[in-house]
Amino acid sequence: MFEKIQGHQTITNHLSKEINTNEVSHAYLFSGMDGIGKKKTAREFAKALLCRDETNKGCGHCTVCTQIEHENYPDVKIIGPKPGEASIKISQVRAMISELSIKPYSGNWRINIIDGAERMTPEAQNSLLKSLEEPLSYNIFILITSHAQTILPTIRSRCQSYHFQPLNFPDIEKIISEEGEFDQKAVTEALMASGGSPGMALYLLNNSEIQKERTHYLREVYSLLKGDEIKVFTLAEALSKDKTISQEMLEFFIHWFYEVDLLLAGHPLPNSGQPNPAHQAYHQLLGNEKNQAIIKTLFEMMATIQYNVNLRLQWEKCFIKIMKIQKG
């Protein structure tokens, strides 16, 4: 059970105990940075609950486990933002809710996974709330999120929460080695830039231009913080061209300023990583209160772009507010 999961033994031990003692909760919140193993754990949890092998729960080989792995088992429903869209719409949540009264196809559970739960619109979250308040005995919800703060408190309070911590480098290297062969120098650079996320490390290894792009945007935002007002408009224009890239860069900015926040508070970076020159430059430029205000502004931006909004205008507003924060 959970043999495929690297680096989250405390969480998997708790989940195993719940299964073995028949004390499974009706709702879970899996939080932590992107690419860290939350969805994989949710799938393995579903396998362990529904597997037909009584002696080796979550065997990975039976028909049920195979179908869950390929996301086509009828008792495991997974929803997330549709291709090309930034948010999970109320219609998607309502469609999931409409099936909750259907008894499980086989086994004792119907498992409903919401991947990217922070991207549910407020209307979608409110639509989900009643089903969490009055759950049917055979329904289990697993909400997967990289930003738990954007989930309604009333939803969070009805879920058993598990926060996935960044993985150490040996665990990430083991996962990378299972995906293929990569140049060792590139692996080292990807590890340092991953923030403890194996998914991010693999993403960077398979997309070498991404790191250059991120470095470019960090320089641009640094210039903005130094008072270059033109960057408000050039950054907003560049980031508004593609909604998916816009979302990815926003998540990267949040993670970046979180790392700066750790340094400002005197804490080490995840995995005891060494601050790079960009970390040091931001650390010298920002104070703790200003940095936290910037993080709050970026989270507000995250909530705003769940809607069909003018991305360029929203980025301009966001960067203007960040400039004002820095100016004090």
Image (cartoon, rainbow, N blue to C red):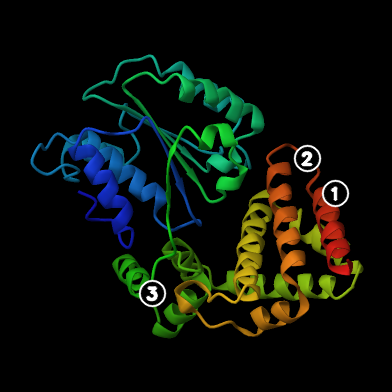
Which amino acid lies under the numbered mark 3 shown in the image of this protein? Phe
Query: Is residue 158 depicted above or below 264 in this figure?
Result: above
Residue at the image position 75 percent from the left and 59 percent from the top: 293
Q: Secondary structure at mark 2?
A: loop
Whole-angstrom CA distance, mark 1 to mark 2, is 8 Å
How many badges with numbers are in the image?
Answer: 3
Residue at the image position 44 percent from the left and 66 percent from the top: 202
Which amino acid lies under the numbered mark 2 shown in the image of this protein? Val
Of 239 and 157, the residue lying toward us = 157
Badge 3: how crowded within 10 Å, few (<14), some, or many (20+)?
many
N-term-proximal mark, 2 vs 3: 3
Q: As drawn, is 59 to the left or to the right of 255?
A: left
**Rendered image: mark on residue 69:** none
Query: Percent from the top left, x then y, of residue 308?
Result: 74, 37
Q: Secondary structure at mark 1?
A: helix
Mark in the foreground, 2 or 3: 3
**Rendered image: mark on residue 169:** 3
Whole-angstrom CA distance, mark 2 to mark 3, is 39 Å
Residue labelled with disc 1: 313
Q: Are marks 1 and 2 in contact (CB under 8 Å)?
A: yes
Of 312 and 2, the residue lying toward us = 2
N-term-proximal mark, 3 vs 1: 3
Mark in the foreground, 3 or 1: 3
Residue labelled with disc 2: 309
Image quadrant assignment for residue 235: bottom right
